[in-house]
Image (cartoon, rainbow, N blue to C red):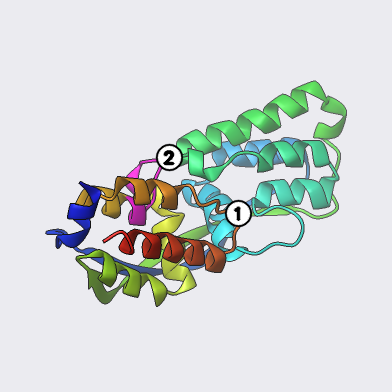
């Protein structure tokens, strides 16, 4: 069935989009872990997105530290590596809503402060400033109706466009998948390929290496014909 689907032209094209993000510093900040918890409880959804989903796309290649801003600040400013690691283990691929991610971030910090209250009010070396991201999307005028056209579009997609379709799309789809896999499965019936792409690790790969793996998976699928 998958081979037949690959040969067909999809009625619903995949439209390639790129995105840019405007960053705004909010009026909330934290100098202690207790204040970080308060900020997490009351900051905007856009702020949670900025410091988790957006920073993963911006810092797509890290030699040290964490891509999650909350974990990074906890490590570098308060020197609480144990809490930082707990915050960093929250995998954004598991979340399809900001509310669920916020809830778990708050739970981790709240539990730590309750278990070790002596650290809750200790001042960090630097304050944490809650920022927001405003997403601006632009359609690139490129679309795909079959696997060959999809590969061509993917190969020339910018980092920003790749991030938009592969990482932040989970919130937009409210599914534990990405735009690429969703279209390949729903429109071309390539469920095995879609699943393999969805399992590419966004934490151990750069955006470039994730794209390279995706292209190799697509080429392997094309050789089946």
Q: Residue at x 24, y 71 (%)?
A: 143
Q: Judging from the image, what secondary structure is the residue with disc 1 in?
A: strand
| Foreground residue among 138 and 190 | 190
- In the depicted structure, whether residue 190 falls above or below residue 151: above
- In the depicted structure, whether residue 42 falls above or below residue 182: above
Image quarter (top left, top right, bottom left or bottom right) of the C terminus: bottom left
At which x and y percent is residue 131?
58, 57
Q: Judging from the image, what secondary structure is the residue with disc 2 in?
A: loop
Residues rendered magenta in the picture = 172-181
In screen coordinates, is 87 left or right of 101? right
Q: Residue at x 67, y 39 (%)?
A: 87
| Foreground residue among 47 and 26 | 47
Q: Which residue is mark 1?
A: 27
How crowded pointer 2 is (Cα within 10 Å; few <14, some 14-19, many 20+) is rated as some
Residue 20 is at least partly visible in this image: no
At which x and y percent is residue 187?
20, 53
In screen coordinates, is 119 left or right of 50? right
How crowded pointer 1 is (Cα within 10 Å; few <14, some 14-19, many 20+) is rated as few
* 176 is within the stretch colored magenta: yes
* 20 is within the stretch colored magenta: no
Residue 102 is at least partly visible in this image: yes
Q: Which residue is mark 2?
A: 97
Most distant residue in the top direction: 115
The mark that comes first in sequence, 1 or 2, is 1
- In the depicted structure, whether residue 174 falls above or below residue 8: above
Residue 76 is labelled as none
Q: Residue at x 82, y 41 (%)?
A: 81
């Amino acid at each position: 069935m998958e081979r037949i689907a690959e040969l067909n032209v999809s009625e619903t094209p995949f439209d390639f989009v790129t995105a840019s993000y405007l960053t705004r510093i909010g009026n909330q900040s934290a100098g202690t872990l207790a204040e970080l918890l308060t900020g997490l409880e009351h900051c905007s959804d856009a702020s949670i997105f900025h410091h988790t989903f957006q920073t993963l796309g911006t810092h797509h290649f890290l030699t040290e530290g964490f891509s999650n801003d909350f974990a990074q600040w906890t490590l570098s400013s308060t020197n609480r590596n144990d809490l930082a690691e707990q915050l960093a283990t929250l995998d954004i691929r598991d979340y399809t809503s900001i509310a669920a991610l916020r809830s778990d971030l708050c739970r981790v910090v709240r539990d730590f402060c309750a278990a070790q209250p002596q650290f809750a009010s200790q001042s960090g070396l630097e304050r944490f400033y809650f920022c927001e991201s405003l997403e601006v999307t632009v359609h690139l005028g490129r679309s795909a109706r079959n696997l060959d056209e999809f590969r061509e579009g993917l190969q020339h997609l910018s980092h920003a466009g790749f991030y938009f379709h592969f990482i932040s799309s989970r919130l937009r789809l409210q599914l534990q998948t990405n735009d690429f896999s969703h279209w390949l499965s729903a429109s071309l019936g390539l469920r095995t390929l879609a699943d393999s792409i969805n399992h590419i690790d966004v934490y151990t790969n750069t955006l470039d290496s994730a794209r390279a793996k995706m292209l190799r998976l697509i080429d392997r699928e094309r050789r089946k014909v």
